[in-house]
Amino acid sequence: MFDAEVLVAPIIIFMIVVAPLWLILHYRSKKQVSQGLSEHEHRQLLELAQKADKMADRVETLEALLDQEAPQWRRKV
């Protein structure tokens, strides 16, 4: 049959080395996620929101120009 003693050493190594590191890294990442955005990430988010607002304004302007120049453009899409 299968010798259970073969698994003892890998299990012990896993429990002593791998499992503690895994738990430490797991909870460290959970802590970072729960802290929220860093100052740099918050600044980047605000910049992206401003760029999105500008892009939305540009799209509205483009649509208004297209409505004037080619009123049928919406039906082609």
Image (cartoon, rainbow, N blue to C red):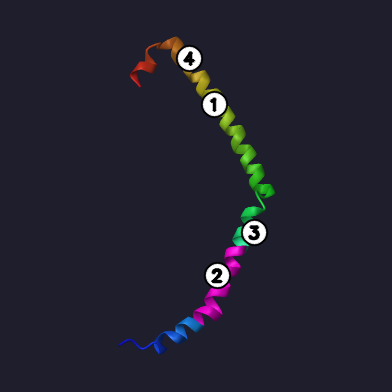
Quadrant hosting residue 70: top left
| Residue at image coords 60%, 60% | 29
Q: Which mark is residue 31?
A: 3
Q: Does the magenta stretch include residue 36?
A: no
Quadrant hosting residue 44: top right
- Residue at mark 3 to residue at mark 1: CA–CA distance: 36 Å
- Whichever of callouts 4 and 3 sits on the residue coming sooner in the sequence is 3
- Residue at mark 2 to residue at mark 1: CA–CA distance: 44 Å
Does 71 appear above or below 21? above
Residue 30 percent coordinates (x, y): 61, 59
Which secondary structure, mark 1?
helix
Which secondary structure, mark 3?
helix
- Closest to the observer, 7 or 67: 7
Residue 14 percent coordinates (x, y): 50, 79
| Residue at image coords 61%, 54% | 33
Which residue is tagged 1?
56
- Whichever of callouts 3 and 1 sits on the residue coming sooner in the sequence is 3
Q: Are marks 1 and 4 in contact (CB under 8 Å)?
A: no
Residue 67 percent coordinates (x, y): 45, 12
User: Magenta stretch: dominant SS?
Assistant: helix
Q: Residue 22 carries which label?
A: 2
- Whichever of callouts 1 and 4 sits on the residue coming sooner in the sequence is 1
Q: Are marks 2 and 3 in contact (CB under 8 Å)?
A: no
Q: Which mark is residue 65?
A: 4
- Closest to the observer, 70 or 75: 75
Q: What residue type is labelled 1?
A: Ala
> Where does the N terminus fall, quadrant-wise?
bottom left
Q: Which stretch appears magenta?
A: 13-27
Q: Which amino acid does label 3 sit on?
A: Lys
Does 18 appear above or below 61? below
Q: Which mark is residue 1?
A: none
Q: Which amino acid does label 4 sit on?
A: Leu
